[in-house]
Amino acid sequence: MSMIYRPRRLRATGGIRSMVRETVLMPANLVYPLFIVPGTNVKREISSMVGNYHLSADNAVELAREAYALGIPAVLVFGLPEYKDERGSSAWDMSSPVQQAITAIKQAIPELVVISDVCLCEYTSHGHCGLIHGQQVDNDATVPLLAQVALSHAEAGADMVAPSDMMDGRVAAIRASLDNSGYSNVSIMSYAAKYASAYYGPFREAADSAPQFGDRRAYQMDPANSREALREVALDIEEGADIVMVKPALAYLDIVRQVKDEFLLPVAAYNVSGEYAMIKAAAAQGLIDEPRMVIESLTNMKRAGADIIITYHALDAVKWL
Ligand code: PBG
Ligand code: ZN
């Protein structure tokens, strides 16, 4: 049989495959999330996300150091506060665990990029991402509070703030409040296309942020929509976002690709808790090859267009590269 082009020629050996490989995942592509709790010397495994921990600020510094030593350039910090109320006021309290951890990490490892998640759901008694009026989340009453949270993170030393609330207009308000207070160098990674997803289930336990009534469908996006994602991204860019995120990742790689093709800003993909937990559960049952599946999944997020991948697998993944 004679064929002019035989694709298998370039798959014949590991050497040849490495020469024609189009996408190579690097530690520098990854961001490692950390969950900060009150106290000292706390390191408790999160049962819904085995291999991830609730960490007091001191232990968060140690894990951040490990990530940095492995070549991971950034951490994304989430806070579990000492107290919750209707307004989520512990979210901008400088003595709350996350603000303390930001300062401690930046002091110990100045070169590590510290990104902070900006939202209210971990801090409100009702678990919603904004202020409740009646049964609704009040967009415009929430936005100034988010700006205050972002400012408190910048004051603590964060390099980048990442609003995950999905209120309209929050990126502009955060940009203005940072600029007015002398933090024009603090960048914004916006959760621009964030879907109302069942894949966040395990995170709700990790961050103690489940809504006490209703759901988030009146502010997070409908998973059925892609054109709307492009409108969301365009808006956040107009408002001053520096990096735009698509979340979740694996079931939304078409969105990652469209955002990458349509806009010129760096694109982040969030490999969320449910995606992580599915691989961990299948691996624990001996059903899959965990290292191969993790590297394959993360590489494909990059192939789809993600410059930055936020993942709970980060520490393992760099060891498996
Ligand atoms: C809070 C927030 C959530 C996640 C990141 N920030 C949960 C939610 O919106 O309900 C999800 C992360 C994950 O599942 O890994 N706004
Ligand atoms: Zn939230």
Image: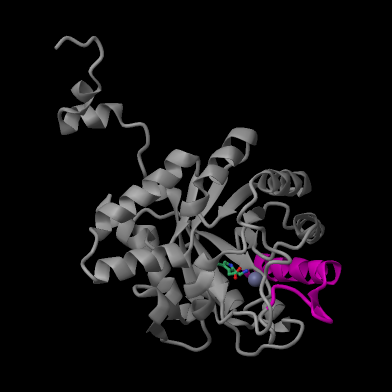
Q: Is residue 172 magenta?
A: no
Residue 120 is at least partly visible in this image: yes
- Residue 179 location (% of width, % of height): 78, 55
Please state which of residues 75 and 5 is positioned toward the viewer in this rendering. Answer: 5
Residue visible at 29% across and 66% down in the picture? 282
Give the color scheme: rainbow, by chain, secondary structure or one colour. one colour
Residue positioned 72% across, 81% down in the render: 88
Find residue 108 and report its horizontal and vertical position in percent: 46, 68
Looking at the image, can residue 46 be seen? no
- Measured as percent of width and height from the top left, residue 126 is found at 69, 84
Q: Is residue 38 left or right of residue 138?
A: left
Residue 264: x percent and y percent?
Answer: 63, 35
Q: Residue at x 35, y 39 (%)?
A: 24
* Quadrant in the picture for residue 123: bottom right
Asked if residue 134 is among those painted magenta in the image, a careful observer would answer yes
The image quarter containing residue 221 is bottom right
With 305 as the anchor, is 63 left or right in this view? left
Quick check: 158 above or below 214? above
Image region (quadrant) for ligand 2: bottom right
When the figure is inspected, residue 130 is found, relative to residue 20, above or below; the finding is below
Q: Residue at x 61, y 59 (%)?
A: 195
Which region shows up in magenta?
Answer: 128-157
Q: Quadrant of the N terminus?
A: top left
Left/right placement of residue 248 relative to residue 152 reads left
